[in-house]
């Protein structure tokens, strides 16, 4: 492990990758998407401010929650002066995502509960589909797994 001084103000991309546990290629990708920023040295090497570690941790945690990068970028852009998120910022941003996360949780629970019965596609290929989706009524609503997507179909309308 590379030894980075605790008071070092900047990190190379390799140091940031090692310290954050994120691959260099992912850091380059985050930078290309405007999620993190670096400055270039005279030798054209990237240098990241030390607080980028917190920003990367914020990005990774948000991704683990299933938040799309575009949404993460938009949330980070709301921060004053493009600064690193604080605990209060995280609380505010995560509260704004609560509804979306609740929807995902509901979808996953329905997927888990219906996994052995039907994938909700409206295919009528399983014997039970005739009971869960008589006359392929869900097929008329559009493509895809209609029963498991709570944004399309709620438990009261699809069961």
Image (cartoon, rainbow, N blue to C red):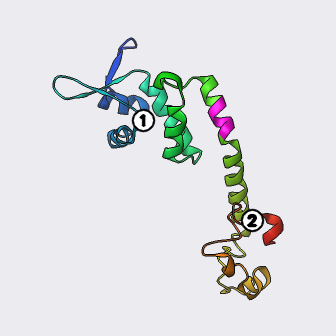
- For residue 21, which numbered disc appears in the image? 1
Q: Where residue 155 sits in the image (x, y, percent)? A: 80, 65
Question: Which residue is found at the position 81% from the left and 69% from the top?
Answer: 157
- Read off the magenta span: 92-96
> In front here: 136 or 15?
136
Above or below for 13 versus 28: above
Q: Residue furthest top?
A: 7
- For residue 113, which numbered disc appears in the image? 2
Q: Where residue 46 sits in the image (x, y, percent)? A: 27, 29
Quadrant location of the C terminus in the rendered image: bottom right
**Total number of numbered labels?**
2
Question: Can residue 34 be seen by looking at this rendering?
Answer: yes
Question: Main structural element of the magenta stretch: helix, strand or loop?
Answer: helix
* Marks 2/1: CA–CA distance: 35 Å
> In front here: 3 or 122?
122
Q: Where residue 21 sits in the image (x, y, percent)? A: 42, 35
Give the side of residue 150 with respect to residue 27, left or right. right
Q: Is residue 25 magenta?
A: no
Local packing at callout 2 (Cα closer than 10 Å; few below 14, some 14-19, many 20+) is few
Question: Which residue is found at the position 50% from the left and 33% from the top?
Answer: 77
- For residue 30, which numbered disc appears in the image? none
Give residue 141's quadrant in the image: bottom right
Question: Which structural element holds mark 2?
Answer: helix
Quadrant location of the N terminus in the rendered image: top left
Q: Where residue 89 sits in the image (x, y, percent)? A: 60, 26
């Amino acid at each position: 492990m590379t030894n980075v001084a605790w008071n070092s103000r900047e990190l190379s991309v390799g140091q940031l990758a090692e310290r954050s546990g994120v691959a260099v290629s992912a850091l380059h990708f985050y930078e290309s998407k405007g999620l993190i920023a670096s400055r270039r040295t005279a030798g054209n090497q990237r240098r990241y401010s030390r607080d980028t570690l917190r920003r990367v941790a914020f990005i990774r945690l948000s991704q683990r929650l299933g938040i799309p990068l575009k949404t993460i970028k938009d949330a980070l852009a709301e921060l004053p002066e493009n600064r690193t998120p604080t605990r209060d910022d995280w609380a505010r941003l995560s509260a704004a995502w609560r509804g979306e996360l609740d929807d995902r949780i509901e979808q996953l629970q329905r997927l888990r509960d219906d996994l052995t019965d039907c994938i909700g596609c409206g295919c009528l290929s399983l014997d039970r589909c005739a009971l869960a989706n008589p006359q392929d009524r869900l097929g008329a609503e559009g493509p895809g797994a209609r029963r498991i997507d709570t944004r399309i179909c709620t438990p009261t309308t699809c069961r």
